Amino acid sequence: MTTQPTRLLSSSLSRRSLLCAMASGAGALALSSCSQGSRAPGSGTVEYWLWDASQLPAYEACAEVFKARTGITVNITQIAWGDYWTKLTAGFIAGTGPDVFTDHISKFAQFVDLDVLVPLDEQAAWAGVDESAFQAGLIDLWKGEDGHQYGCPKDWDTVAAFYNKDMLSQAGLTDEDMADWSWNPTDGGTFERILARLTVDKNGVRGDEPGFDKSRVAVYGLGIQDAGAGDGQTQWSPFTGSAGDWYYTNKETWGNHYRYDEKLFQETMDWYFGLVDKGYMPPRGAFSSTTSTDVQLGSGRIAMCFNGSWMFSTYAKLDIEVGVAANPVGPNGRSMSLFNGLGDSICKQSANIEQASQWVAFLGTAEAQDIVASYGIVFPAIASSSDKAVKVFEETGLTTAPFTQHVKDRSTFFFPLTYFGADVTAIMKPATDDLWANRAPASTLTAYNDQVNLLFETSTHATG
């Protein structure tokens, strides 16, 4: 059933009411939680929030160096992703949020629209940040439509395929087969043939052999955890990004018209989720919704999956021999990856903006990002620090080339940076879930796309 969109008209709603809408559901709980951790106004201590527990030690190390240099204490709070945004939004409402927080592109535009972020370029500390040191494109990803800098790039990520090397060998395939694969929406190309070969039913029959029982699969060639909502970052984005000239919206950043209704996109989605019908990819329900693809791969129930560079160390630690391959080459002749990155933003409500600005500016230096690089969790945003992270990553024995090559040869496309990011996700999640769970045709996405675009057509962002 088609869901009717909720119109968020920024011109007719106050910022407070918009924030309250964003914090609905668990908002009251979050408000209570945030209030308990409130700080004394103007205390000088910078409150910094992040969600990734694996990155906490790196930023604690950065905070120690920063304090030794400036005398400013940074108190770091780690909140799991599932609660992070609700508590952050509740903090905006109650005035108990952090001074600085780790920001995500999917949320960034709405925070800019709500005018709750500090323009970094208006702060004296920002003058010490060398914007040219960041990987190409990252600094602009955190600029508002007004040209102000609202986020300092902290890292970047791309997507590649992780696979079970033993399963590959048992199937009679080699790493070279993975390095030279391609796909198309007609017959799936060598990518689909590899998937078929890696898929095994409970009788030991492979997906490309006579008698294969797609209803009783023991090992799926490709695993996924969810349908990807509106971006499909670690699901279908490597394919929609290499299908032709399709992108999420009408502009590289700050688009105001989504393109989920286009034939090229829908053909690709029909092919991708059609892998379920062939038995090569698990139907929804084959795994728990909380069973991530690294767990699926480690359990031996899937032979490969796509995931982001931020998961590199997790896959490297699996109790199997893991390989990494670049995304298959698509009909446009290129292997493509979504290019995303996190940033640090300052809350306007902060009573410590000057100290917060110094902290953010420090995080934008090679010194700080070299510290982050040494922990081998993410690729820092500064190019020279990324090179250092590569060396740490490759101590695991896995190559980083499938991730870094996209940055080097510019075979990337941006995560959709638009207003109404939360609303787009709310609309598109059930839409793509329907493709996966019920095998609805991708043509149904046209109606959902109309709902998404109505958000822009009925708002002040209609002609951004």
Image (tube, rainbow, N blue to C red):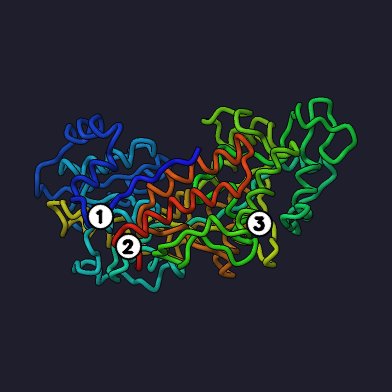
Write down the residue under mark 1: 10
- List x then y, in percent, for residue 240: 60, 57
Q: Which residue is mark 2?
A: 461
Q: Front-most of 329 and 417? A: 417
Q: Name the spot of residue 234 as percent of width and height, x first.
A: 56, 48
Q: Earlier in the sequence, mark 1 or mark 3?
A: 1
Q: Are marks 2 and 1 in contact (CB under 8 Å)?
A: yes
Which residue is found at the position 19% from the left and 57% from the top?
70
| Rendered position, 247 above or below 35 | below
Instruction: Determine the residue located farthest toward the right in the rendered image.
Output: 210
Residue indicated by mark 3:
326
Q: Is residue 8 above or below residue 387?
A: above
Q: Position of residue 180 (x, y in %)?
A: 76, 59
* Residue 202 at x, y percent in the picture: 79, 25
Amino acid beneath label 3: Ala
User: Dot 2, how many residues are within 10 Å of its Cα: few (below 14), some (14-19), or many (20+)?
Assistant: some
